[in-house]
């Protein structure tokens, strides 16, 4: 494929943006090379500035569950656009979308719209601290909850250690209130809660990890966290920004039958437009201003364009058999990829939950970030670039999930498998 124009665009962008991008992973730092500059998306397909065409498994990092530029969602946005883009005042669409969300996620009795997943998680943490009057939070290594200061931390030298900043500009004093533990290690959580449970405001968790690749919870992990939180009066926050309406219509909490105290949402509920939300039990949410002392605000929160796109998207994915068809497509793709890699004797782990999936190049199980980091990164880079050169677009990092849309056709899946077979022939 020719990437001449994208190379020129990338060079120009680096003059204006750090690394030439507005979100770090887009710079291809983990895989090398030049990122294609996308000029058009429709259905399950992308086109770049060089005229190259791709089958897309990134889906704008999750929200394109219907495929790109769905005609019904576009029509809803255009209809809303005719009445204005932002009012900074209450709208009917906010309540309509909230009613849909609360019906699909019964754990949410009251919610607040924001503009991103980062805002949702940041606000949920503030709410948890304000509600419990405690300061400490627990998160998992490798789980990303946005770039709020108290969440940009990594594990220290111990398995159950207080966090250290992973970003310049994050005060170490703030990071010390964040404890970082391994995903899928319930014993580590139990030990820390035994020591610090009365100080912990919340455990925030991706119920299915999506930012170390797609890593599902092991048996009883989420249930165990729920019991620990109940025991110590700690709030359980599910970060379903990625999994919400992705792994199941009712999110991961319905899939695993766990009720969190607060849920963070994003991606799908905006139908491709910037949006986020956090919500939970009415008793907890009533601590948010103007009802309570925990302050959070946003001029563009609940803007009518995002609300219209979200309403139409959630209505469409609520249709009978939508998820049955979506998951069937994802299962067909992942089972065939695994079969091809197995026949080529390429060690791998294939993970799928709902319409999220990842392939890890390792002979060992992947249950947490340490396992994911131990996988063959060089082989992933080879895999990524071969697919890109042959018209298959996956995330430019081994630590990101892939996503299926309802718009992916049988032909798209067959072509993807065919390309992977060709890679195996030359890279086994």
Image (tube, rainbow, N blue to C red):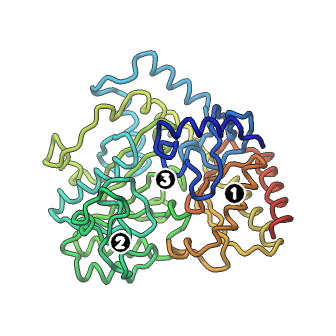
Q: Name the residue under label 2.
A: 180
Residue drawn at (74%, 53%), measured in percent from left and top? Answer: 387
Q: Which of 139 and 8 is in front in this view?
A: 8
Residue drawn at (78%, 49%), measured in percent from left and top? Answer: 390
Q: Name the residue under label 1.
A: 384
Q: Name the residue under label 3.
A: 242
The local secondary structure at tag 1 comes to: helix
Instruction: Compute the Cα span from label 2 to label 1.
Output: 30 Å
The local secondary structure at tag 2 comes to: strand
- Which label's residue is closer to the chain start, 3 or 2? 2
Quick check: 341 left or right of 113? right
Q: In this view, does 346 lie above or below 258?
A: below
Q: Nearer the viewer, residue 148 or 307?
A: 148
Identity of the residue furthest to the top in this view = 82
Instruction: Compute the Cα span from label 3 to label 2.
Output: 20 Å
- Residue 189 in picture, x, y percent from top left: 35, 78
- Residue 320 in picture, x, y percent from top left: 60, 44
Residue drawn at (36%, 45%), measured in percent from left and top? Answer: 277
- Which label's residue is closer to the chain start, 2 or 1? 2
Q: Is residue 390 above or below residue 297?
A: below
């Amino acid at each position: 494929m020719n990437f001449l124009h994208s190379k020129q665009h990338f060079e120009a962008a680096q003059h204006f943006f750090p690394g030439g991008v507005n979100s770090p992973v887009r710079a291809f730092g983990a895989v090398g090379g030049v990122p294609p500059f996308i000029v058009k998306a429709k259905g399950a397909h992308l086109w770049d500035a060089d005229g190259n065409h791709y089958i897309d498994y990134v889906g704008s990092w999750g929200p394109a569950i219907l495929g790109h530029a769905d005609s019904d969602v576009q029509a809803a946005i255009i209809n809303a656009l005719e009445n204005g883009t932002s009012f900074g005042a209450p709208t009917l669409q906010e309540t309509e979308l909230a009613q849909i969300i609360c019906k699909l996620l019964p754990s949410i009795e009251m919610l607040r719209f924001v503009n991103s997943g980062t805002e949702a998680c940041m606000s949920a943490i503030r709410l948890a601290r304000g509600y419990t009057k405690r300061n400490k939070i627990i998160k998992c290594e490798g789980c990303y909850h946005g770039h709020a200061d108290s969440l940009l931390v990594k594990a220290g030298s111990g398995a159950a250690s207080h966090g250290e900043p992973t970003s310049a500009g994050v005060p170490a004093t703030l990071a010390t209130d964040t404890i970082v533990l391994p995903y899928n290690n319930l014993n580590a959580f139990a030990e820390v809660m035994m020591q610090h449970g009365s100080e912990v405001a919340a455990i925030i968790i991706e119920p299915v990890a999506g930012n170390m690749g797609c890593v599902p919870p092991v048996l009883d992990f989420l249930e165990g966290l729920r019991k620990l939180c109940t025991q110590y009066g700690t709030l359980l926050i599910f970060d379903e920004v990625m999994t919400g309406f992705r792994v199941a219509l009712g999110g991961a909490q319905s899939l695993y039958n766990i009720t969190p105290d607060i849920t963070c949402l994003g991606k799908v509920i905006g139908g491709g437009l910037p949006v986020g939300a956090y919500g939970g039990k009415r008793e907890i949410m009533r601590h948010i201003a103007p009802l309570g002392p925990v302050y959070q605000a946003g001029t563009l929160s609940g803007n009518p364009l995002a609300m219209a796109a979200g309403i139409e998207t959630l209505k469409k994915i609520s249709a009978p058999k939508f998820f049955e068809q979506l998951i069937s497509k994802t299962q067909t793709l992942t089972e065939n990829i695994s079969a091809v890699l197995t026949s080529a004797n390429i060690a791998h782990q294939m993970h799928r939950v709902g319409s999220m999936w990842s392939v890890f190049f390792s002979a060992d199980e992947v249950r947490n970030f340490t396992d994911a980091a131990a996988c063959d990164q060089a082989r992933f880079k080879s895999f990524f670039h071969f697919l890109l050169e042959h018209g298959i677009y996956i995330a430019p990092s081994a630590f990101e999930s892939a996503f299926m849309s309802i718009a992916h056709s049988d032909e798209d899946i067959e072509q993807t498998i065919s390309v992977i077979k060709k890679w195996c022939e030359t890279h086994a």
